[in-house]
Amino acid sequence: MATNEAKKKPNAKGGGGGGGSKKKEVKKETGLGLSFKKDENFGEWYSQVVVSAEMIEYYDISGCYIIRPWAWKIWKLMKEFFEKEIDKMEIEDCSFPLFVSPAALQRETDHIEGFAPEVAWVTKSGESDLEIPIAIRPTSETVMYPYFPKWIRGHRDLPLKLNQWNNVVRWEFSNPTPFIRSREFHWQEGHTAFASKEEADVEVLAILELYRRIYEEYLAIPVVKGKKSEMEKFAGGLYTTSVEAFIPNTGRGIQGATSHCLGQNFANMFDIKFEDEKGNKRMVWQNSWGYSTRTIGVMVMVHGDDKGLVVPPKVASSQVVVVPVPYKDADTQAILDACSDAVKTLTEAGLRAKADLRDNYSPGWKYSHWEMKGVPLRIEIGPKDLANNQVRAVRRDNFKKVDIPMASLAEQVKDMLDDIQKSLFDSAKEKRDACIEKVATWDQFIEALGKKKMILAPWCDEEEVEKDVKTRTKGEMGAAKTLCSPLDQPDIPSGTLCFASGKPAKKWSYWGRSY
């Protein structure tokens, strides 16, 4: 999905931004609608939504973006959940430098070959050339692991469990896309060391389950937990697991987060060993795992519509916005007071609510504005609502309206937000599941690929066959590849053959085009 880096930011406030004194004029000049429809021009629609919803601003370096508060709050809420969970696992936060020496970066051959095209280098200080260039981390294995031998000497020093929240730089790519594909991105990366492979394996899946929960319970996005192929695994690792999402509008899979077992490869390279209970020297087993601000982009793609962003309540910066609707000759102050009281009631109940009391915008403009920003629930209070001691609630996901008595406001709003969260997930899962197609032959595979499906196919698990599939499906839309082999494997009937090679199938794998 290409985006236009040179594009100017659409006017997020439209013609109403001047705040004219005549309300009729303001009401006419909303200017908040999107120029592109999701089903007709997905790439331009996405680019416009993330700017118009005030999630990002374009920066003057291609592939770098300013993440604005509306999006950063989403990241913060996910972070709060994740930190609580890894605290239970006794994983500790730390911070390592941004820079990595060439000697450390090149210690692990497969790793550096995997990242070499993306590494950015600092070569000057002022006007002087550096004697030795310094790399900016694309990931932190080679930054952190030279120091693990200092901290791990004996079995009592294990396990070592570290996590850091940081930003990394990966430079070489085409078609930058906010949140999805950027030169600098924010993430968490966990790095752990264990005495045994069994302990490492348990953690890999425990972290993967947390990533599933972030997507499904918080972002309301269905994902598949699976294992990457040898070709697609983390460079230098033993094996990689991931959660994979799917974007029905584009027919592309997207890697949501990864949890890697690194085995003992990095331990050998960096001499990370320990003395066991019997006095023998042994290499540690290591994991690394991470999820990034890509999660926000996937949320936009899955839930957004032609009116803008749709944010699930659990990650919404504001779950409820209260809008006064004063008519001519109405007691405006009483309505404003009722709005403030409603916000107080909701916030005291633990909800994130705010009132839009700006007097230079009409109610209609405010509706469009907060719909663009994806606030899950809008509450309107007008003269009739005031007289009846009630509010009118409007859902962002389906625009259904319901009148709620003030006496039960907090309780009913909580129930509505829970229902919105569930409905968003159910709707996304229904659309995703409709895109999954099970095939048995190459002809069926090609037909499903042409229909932009997420394809479940029996596979012989051979790298040469995987390469051949990529070669045979190359085109303007990009080649197909393995997304993952689901951990929850369907039965493979005896005699089942690989869809691509005709050899005996060993597993089911998801295939498709991807971001």
Image (tube, rainbow, N blue to C red):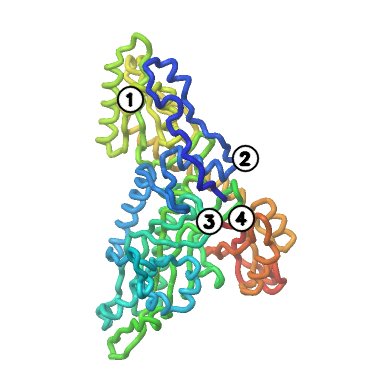
Q: Crowding near pointer 1: few (<14 within 10 Å), some, many (20+)?
A: few
Q: Can residue 134 be seen from the camera position used here?
A: yes
Q: Crowding near pointer 3: few (<14 within 10 Å), some, many (20+)?
A: many
Quadrant assignment, res 13: top left
Q: Amino acid at mark 1?
A: Arg
> In screen coordinates, is 250 left or right of 94?
right
Structural distance between the alpha carbons of marks 4 and 3: 11 Å
Kindly state the secondary structure of the residue where label 2 is placed: loop
- The image's mark for residue 358 is 1
Residue beneath disc 3: 254
Residue beneath disc 2: 40
Q: Which residue does the image show at 32% across and 33% down from the upper left?
A: 411
Q: Which residue does the image show at 51% across and 31% down from the upper left?
A: 33
Structural distance between the alpha carbons of marks 4 and 1: 46 Å
The single residue placed furthest to the top in the displayed view is 329
Structural distance between the alpha carbons of marks 3 and 1: 40 Å
Foreground tag (2 vs 3): 2
Q: Earlier in the sequence, mark 2 or mark 1?
A: 2
Structural distance between the alpha carbons of marks 4 and 2: 20 Å
Foreground tag (4 vs 2): 2
Location of residue 146 with respect to 27 vertically, above or below: below
Foreground tag (4 vs 1): 1
Kindly state the secondary structure of the residue where label 1 is placed: loop
